[in-house]
Each structure stands twice: as C-alpha cells, then as structure tokens.
Amino acid sequence: MRIVFMGTPDFAVPSLKALLAAGHEVAAVYTNPDKPKNRGMKMTPSPVKVAALEANLPVIQPKTLRDEAVQAELAALAPELIVVAAYGKILPKVILNLPKYGCVNVHSSLLPKYRGAAPINWAMVNGEKETGVTIMYMAEALDAGDIIAQVVTPIEPEENAEELYNRLADLGGVLLAETVPHLEDGTATRTPQGDVFTYAPMLSRDLCPIDWTRSAQAIHDQIRGLVPWPATTFELEGKVFKAYASQVAGETDKQAGTLLGSDKTGILYACGDGKVLRVTELQAPGKKRMKASAFLAGHKI
C-alpha cells in the first residue's frame, strides 16, 4: 500500500519501521520542523526525521497543514492511506478525506480512556493496572474516531512512564503492521467510541509537588508517572529535590510528611495512609539524577 506517514517523537519510530518491514511503500514522511536544543541551541531533527533519512525516505516538515500549498503537495503524493503516530498537528478535514483508505492514528491508550496529549503518564498517575495501544480512524474531534484494533498490556508495579512509553511504542508498531492489511482487504472493523471518555491533558509542573497526606501507593504512582518530565518534587533539608523512583515500604504511626530517616536504598517518609514511602532515585538541586544510595553515601540524613 502507498502510505504517507506522519509522526515526530521516539514513540512513532517503531510504527514507521513496521510499515517498511511489512513492504509498504512510504511515499513521504511528515514530521515537525527541527527545533533548537540544549545549551548551544543547535537545530535538532526529530527522531522520526532521523529514522526516515536513514531509510532514504523523503521528509517534509511543514509548519502547518492548513496551508493550501501544503495540502496540494500532500495530494500530489497520492497516498492510499495516511498513518499518524504522535505527530503533534491536527489534520484538517480536507486531508482526512484525501486517502482511499482514510487516515488512521496510533494512540497510546485504550480509547475511549485517555484521549489527549499525555495518555501514558495519566494512566500511571491514576493508578491504572493496564493500558495499551489503539489504532483508530481519525476524525475532526481529538482522538474521537472509530476504533479499528487494540492491544492490552499490564502496567507493571515498578514500571515508570518512560519504560512504558518504549513498550507501547513497540506494541504500536506491531499492531499497526497487523492492521493495515485489514484496511486494504476491507475486513477492518469500526467500533464507535461513544460519548463517555476520559481526557489526558498536557503535563505541567503544577503536578510535581508531593502531598504526603495521600496514600503511599498514590505518591508512588505520581513519581513513576511523571518520569522523565516534569518529575515529582519534594523538600529535603530546606531544598527542593526531584524524585524519580520509589517503593511502598512498611507502616508507621508518624504524621504524614514526617521524614523517618534513611536506609541502604533510600529516604523514608510517612504517608497519609499510615504506610511508608522510600524514595530510591532522586536529583538534588544543580546535580545529576542518581540512586538515593549514592546520594546518601555523601549526605547523612
């Protein structure tokens, strides 16, 4: 099948590679324009652009898809299918109606749960036990199109959002490769999402501070759900630290937020449900992210 692929971050790369491995003709790859990055503000290509160039595919980086010249350029490519995976741009109706087999999206949640920008993080922050990937037909409303296929996977108890992101990216590529032939031969199903859904908005630093009156499990989910950004924060010795990993450990009768001390692997705090949370990976102000054991080797609590 002749396909135009649209994507930007690492999450989209396995989907692009899966299409190529399955023998589909990728006419062009659309991705966001290069962005300045790091201290030198060097213009940096997206992971999808890097993968596309490695595969000798044409790369197109429009600032908007609403420009008529951009739409004409896309129409001239004559795609039979447009595949979108975390592209970061809304497709206008004229593009949605362009391909013979429509436009499909690879979305990292079990729709209709967690429509929006940060489904992986919110599933974890909210303590979900499972999540997955959905392939859906795209509609004008955000992540509201009919479901074609889904794959379910458990969220491991100690897994963080970064690790889950990588797993779902790979699962998305596999599911996409399995789904495209059904689109072509007309056997793909369509399941409307209905009117009941949950939303996963963009992350912000407002989510970072730990409220120790919450349960230890809820705080643990917050910490692992905000990795690598914006990262959960807590106060220690008058300074604001970032927490990147934790464990629910034992019980206490101390007041929520009480610093209970430390052990070989972390720093212990009392939580609102009478449980103890051990912070096992952290970042001190102005320092690198490290294991709490390494930090404690040079800092007595």
Image: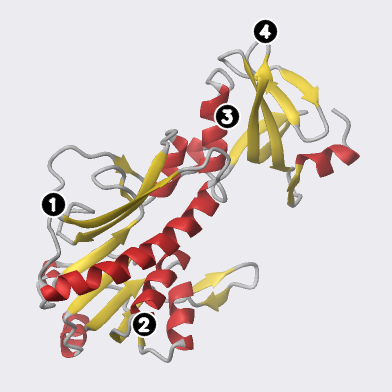
Query: What residue is disc 2 on?
Result: 20
**Three-letter code, disc 1:** Thr
Q: Which badge, 2 or 3, comes first in the chain's sequence?
A: 2
**Three-letter code, disc 4:** Asp
Q: Which badge, 4 or 1, comes first in the chain's sequence?
A: 1
- Which one is in front in this view, the residue at disc 4 or the one at disc 1? 1
Q: Foreground: 236 or 246?
A: 246
Badge 4 density bin: few <14, some 14–19, many ≥20, Cα 10 Å: few
Q: Which mark is residue 210?
A: 3
Whole-angstrom CA distance, mark 3 to mark 4, is 19 Å
Whole-angstrom CA distance, mark 2 to mark 3, is 44 Å
Q: Secondary structure at mark 4?
A: loop
Label 1 close to label 2 by CB (< 8 Å): no
- Which one is in front in this view, the residue at disc 3 or the one at disc 4? 4
- Which one is in front in this view, the residue at disc 2 or the one at disc 3? 2
Q: Foreground: 70 or 250?
A: 250
Label 3 close to label 1 by CB (< 8 Å): no
Residue in the image at 81% along x and 40% along y:
293
Q: Which badge, 1 or 2, comes first in the chain's sequence?
A: 2
The x and y percentages for residue 70 are: 22, 82
